[in-house]
Amino acid sequence: MLLQAARLLRCTEDGRPFYDEFTAVFATLISSLPLQPHTIGLFHARYDFSFSSLEAARNLAELKLQQQNKTIDLTGRRITSTTITTYQIDVRSCAELMQLFLNARLIRCANDPEKSKFKHEMLFQLTPKGIAIVDAFSQRHGVASPNVVDLLKSQHNSMKLVNLERNPVTDQISSSETVIEIIFQRFAGRRPNTTPLHRAHSHHMPSQSLGHSGAPFGGPSNSTTTVALGPSPYPAHGGTSATHHDALPSVLKRESSDTDVSSVSDMYLESSAGVHVHDSKRIHLKEYHNCFSGMAAKLWLMDCTSIIYVHEAQMILTAFLQCDLITPADARSMSSGAEFVMEKNAYYYMSEKGKNLAGWPTTGSGLIHKHGPNRPHSPGSTPYRQSPSAARDKHSRLEHILEDPALRLLFREHLAENFCDENLTFYLESEKLLAQFHELEKNQFPILEKVNVCLSEAWVVYHAFLAPGSASEVNIDHLLRQRVRERMTAEELDTITIPGSQPTESISTAVTKLAEIVKLLDDVRRQVFRLMASDSVPKFMRTAKFLELGIEV
């Protein structure tokens, strides 16, 4: 069975690709690349897991996501179902996408991390954020080349992204006060992150970088110098180190005269430690404790969260200011529009309210104040939104959690910690598929290409969450799973998108098949909802993160 569909990137009103579409294209591109070692430069430095701009442009122009599943039907017949999604990307858009990947800090120039403008004949490597996105995509869809698998198993897969909730219609990040406070807690970390910055060697004198086992990446070489994904937290010449994979340094830095985060070449390797702060720094003859630069804050959001556009980071950081969680240290940190200044010479420090919210020691007592029902709020605000009208049954509780971006963010983290976040992901993906199908139903004469795209999406959901051995298989009862399997393997389907008119019968047949599949997926969605409501929600409501909100749902 073969299903092919061509699709354009879904964009917002101002022309920006939606986050899900953007990251899917990125992960598909990386999975299509060989990610081989490349040797360049005067000193013949070798960069592992790298790719050239020429390779990227060639693959983007013919980008395809292929998912294949092999199963056996009730008669013992072997069935191979293949879904191929082709992204329609022109030559000009290829360069624009590569620039967006650079801006989102998913990749960086391997031999000169200072370069932030895409040019031809550049060499790229993935950042820890880029690797995390490819890892999540590969786990969900079960697609990854052997070279990508090697990268995902390496020490460089160190980032656990803070995934922010987005509006499914506008793709905007939620910016309610409670969401901002939850993001701030991740931003601040459990304690001040004053770890000295590790510094990368100059790109003119690349250093040998060691692999996870202690051997140089790619094996020993007498004629070249091996460089892994940027600077390595491991010793440069085979010595021992107390640093291990579970305690990677928070920031890497190029050679500099002090420990400030001062350029785009600085990079966070993991998110949990929070933004890099100075234990003590003198600014205009005044001493500040736990202060940080605007650049350090910007890079934490761009490196450690699912933010992909700089203006989104600006919005979050400005909200920190407006909620009185941080305070400007000097006049350079205050813009005319009261916006956060994301520059290396602008400094901010955690306010007492911010420290209290993060659970840091506060000035005076030095005690850690737990942020529970009396957690601080901005002047004029009320505690977290109550829901007195919501019924107290388990289904209404889950509906309320899914409708509230802050609760949904915490609920998603809870599910991930318990290794069952595929349930929520499937539920939300199937909701999008249902909305897409209902839009098609409104059209009396649907276009076959759009029907095929929706069919393709349905098969992607099936391959990812329901097919035997799928990467993120959801837990549903045997009878329903059997019904889905029988329908999806009932007949061979050969739907190919061809420009131009199509027979009415072909459209009618495709719509009928789509309606049957969507109905089954909706049945699964309802069962997954009941499972989360009865099992996951009660456990979530007993967690410290939920209880600290001091609310009733």
Image (tube, rainbow, N blue to C red):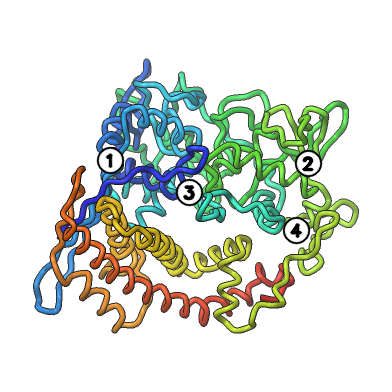
* Disc 1: which residue: 63
Residue that label 4 marks: 359
Disc 3 crowd, CA 10 A, few/some/many (<14, 14-19, 20+): many
On residue 158, which mark appears?
3
- Which structural element holds mark 3? loop
Q: As shown in the figure, which amino acid type bears the numbered disc 4? A: Gly
Amino acid type at image mark 2: Tyr
| Left or right, residue 61 beside residue 259 | left
Q: Name the disc covering residue 349, or none.
A: 2
Label 4 sits on a secondary structure element that is loop
- Of callouts 1 and 2, which one flags the residue occurring earlier in the amino acid sequence? 1
Amino acid under label 3?
Answer: Ser
Query: Quick one: quadrant of the N terminus?
Result: bottom left
Evaluate if marks 1 and 4 touch, with contact meaning CB atoms under 8 Å apart. Answer: no
Sequence order check: which comes first, mark 4 or mark 3? 3
Please name whichever residue, 202 or 63, is drawn nearer the observer in this view of the structure. 63
Number of the front mark, 3 or 2? 2
Mark 4, residues whose alpha carbon is within 10 Å: few (<14), some, or many (≥20)? some
